[in-house]
Image (tube, grey):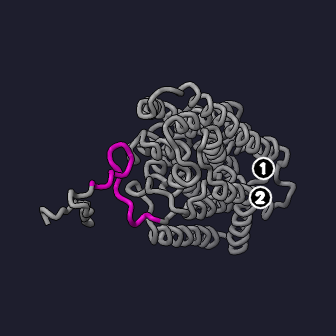
Amino acid sequence: MNLQLFLLIVVVITALVFDFTNGFHDTGNAMATSIASGALAPKAAVTLSAVLNLVGAFLSTAVAATIAKGLIDANLVTLELVFAGLVGGIVWNLLTWLLGIPSSSSHALVGGIVGATIAAVGLHGVIWRGITSKVLIPAVIAAVLAVAISAISTSLVYRLARGVPEKRTNAGFRYGQWGSASLVSLAHGTNDAQKTMGVIFLALMSYGAVSTSASVPPLWVVVSCAVAIAFGTYLGGWRIIRTLGKGLVEIQSPQGMAAESSSAAVILLSAHFGYALSTTQVCTGSVLGSGVGKPGAEVRWGIAGRMAVAWLVTLPLAGLVGAITYWIVHLIGGYPGAIIGFSLLVAVAAAIYQQSRKAKVDHKNVNAEWEGSLTAGLDNAQEPTSNGKPPAPPMPQPDGRAPKVGTDGAVTTARNS
């Protein structure tokens, strides 16, 4: 096996790892509001989202072409450069997942590749007009548009439902969320899975396996990326689901349906025009808009501010990781460079995973009441019932004493103790 083929294999594996992280990092985009409102049970929600992400990945390749040809000069691309860019995207995805910050996987990938390109060939290797027109401007417009559309939609929903009993309203909109959340998952597949396809497409061009004039990636690339993002989605990025569903705004079903419908409309429109849009920014903007549009709703602006800071630093910091990785791999060179680069990625990923286990967030406690931070109060959370909500607390005894709840959830009263 020659060095270039070895590097190509490493790049393809790393790209699919990025696609996997993209899946669990962005599960909250589609399902956080449905889980928070109780429209879908947590495990059912991520399963549905995984299936629809798989289907959505086959519906369009316009975004893949944007990533492959619209952001950096394809004639200057090397496999080392592509690998380093992917490492930048993966590391940033894992760090923000650990912190429960819904940052943009798309911008992490673009930042990593741009940073590696600058490290490899300088500023002239980046198509700055493409970065501005296909990434930066759409990100700002889409986020603002999502907030506005969601706020207006939420306001209209509550106006139309005025006079209808709240219990009946929430029950009806929960059924509506099944459809709106499904549409967001489908839209996510049409947009985000394409980005990894574009990276592998770029690597194949660099290796010479496909022509630089080709406009569609090979079928095996489409299938493998669809499966990777679906598998990542199924595992569920519970930390980010918790931030979006409980931390930013307390979501009810009418808000959830309005937010999801707004997100789907913006994402599908961007995929149609081939924009490498951040679905995270769109969906977060829609959740924020649902809080703005509901009278009396509480929006935690401090959390929104931290998200905005993360969005601003995603491109440069992912780019920095990509640049450092390129320098390490390139300076060592050959087989050792690629092996050491990949080994460092595995080590960083393992360290972040171990850190996340210290305060575990999963389907059992993702809907625990928000107590000021991502992991506060999780130890006392109970496993949700079939509608995604924690079980109601046991009723007090006739003598006024509260019953005891064991670690296994069993209730002990004075009569049976």
The quadrant in which residue 291 appears is: top right
Spatial CA span between label 1 and label 2: 8 Å
Q: Position of residue 220 (x, y in %)?
A: 53, 41
Queried whether the magenta region covers residue 388, the answer comes back as yes
Q: Going 35% across and 58% down the picture, which residue do you hit?
A: 382
Left or right: 403 with respect to 265?
left
Find the magenta span and give its range. Answer: 377-395
* Camera-side residue of 70 and 273: 273
* Camera-side residue of 265 and 253: 253
Q: Secondary structure at mark 1?
A: loop
Query: What residue type is disc 1 on?
Result: Ile
Queried whether the magenta region covers residue 174, the answer comes back as no
Query: What residue type is disc 2 on?
Result: Thr
Q: Position of residue 365 (x, y in %)?
A: 41, 57
Q: Badge 2: few (under 14), some or many (20 or more) residues near its Cα, within 10 Å?
A: many
Q: Going 79% across and 43% down the picture, which residue do you hit?
A: 137
Q: Badge 1: few (under 14), some or many (20 or more) residues near its Cα, within 10 Å?
A: many
Left or right: 56 with respect to 148?
left
Nearest to N terminus: mark 1 or mark 2: 1
Residue lying furthest left: 416
Q: Assess whether mark 2 and mark 1 are in contact (beta carbons under 8 angstroms).
A: yes
Residue 176: assigned label: none
Q: Is residue 35 above or below residue 322?
A: above
Q: Quadrant of the N terminus?
A: bottom right
Provide the residue designation for mark 1: 72
* Camera-side residue of 313 and 323: 313
> Number of marks in the image?
2
Provide the residue designation for mark 2: 117
The quadrant in which residue 162 appears is: top right
Q: Quadrant of the C terminus?
A: bottom left
Q: Is residue 320 above or below residue 171?
A: below
